[in-house]
Amino acid sequence: MVLAPRVNELREEVTFQTKTRTPDLGGGGSTSWGAITTDPTPRAMVRPVRGREDTSEGQVETAQTYLIIVRFREDITTAHKVVWRGTELNIRSVSDRVGDRRHITIEAEKPGKE
């Protein structure tokens, strides 16, 4: 597994999203996901690492897990999502595996149903 990618390996554009809640006049509200604005757009190395398929209540549930490495930043947590090639991925873990504050490694999952 690559822990410290070379600059030319960070070639995929990704966007990070955060959840926001907007209250309405009736005391309720709505929740939506919005992009965390960054300039320039973050570049990443994205690799699929595993997939799974489960059958539950007559439906097939699938999930694909990805390993994503981007330059170090402190504002990304498991409360965020990452968008890669138009696909929303749920962030499962974020770590600075090498400990040098140069890159973070994100494990993210694309859930799905068939």
Image: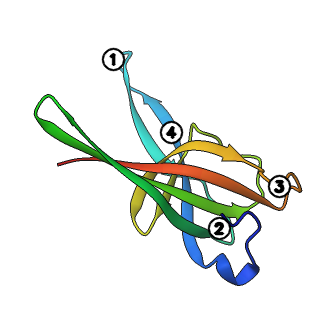
Residue found farthest to the left? 58
Up the image or down, 37 lies above or below 27; here it is below
Reading the image, the residue beneath label 4 is 19
Reading the image, the residue beneath label 1 is 26
Q: Mark 4 or mark 1, which has the lower sequence index?
A: 4
Question: What numbered label is drawn on residue 5?
Answer: none
* 50 with respect to 91 (left or right): left
Q: Are marks 2 and 1 in contact (CB under 8 Å)?
A: no
Please tell me which residue lies in front, 42 or 36: 42
Going by the numbered disc 2, the residue's amino acid type is Pro
Residue displayed at 68% across by 63% down: 70
Residue found farthest to the front? 1
Residue found farthest to the bottom? 8
Residue displayed at 44% across by 55% down: 50
Q: Which image quadrant: the N terminus?
A: bottom right
- Classify mark 3: residues with Cα within 10 Å, few (<14), some (14-19) or many (20+): few
Reading the image, the residue beneath label 3 is 98
The Cα atoms of the two marked residues, 3 and 1, are separated by 49 Å
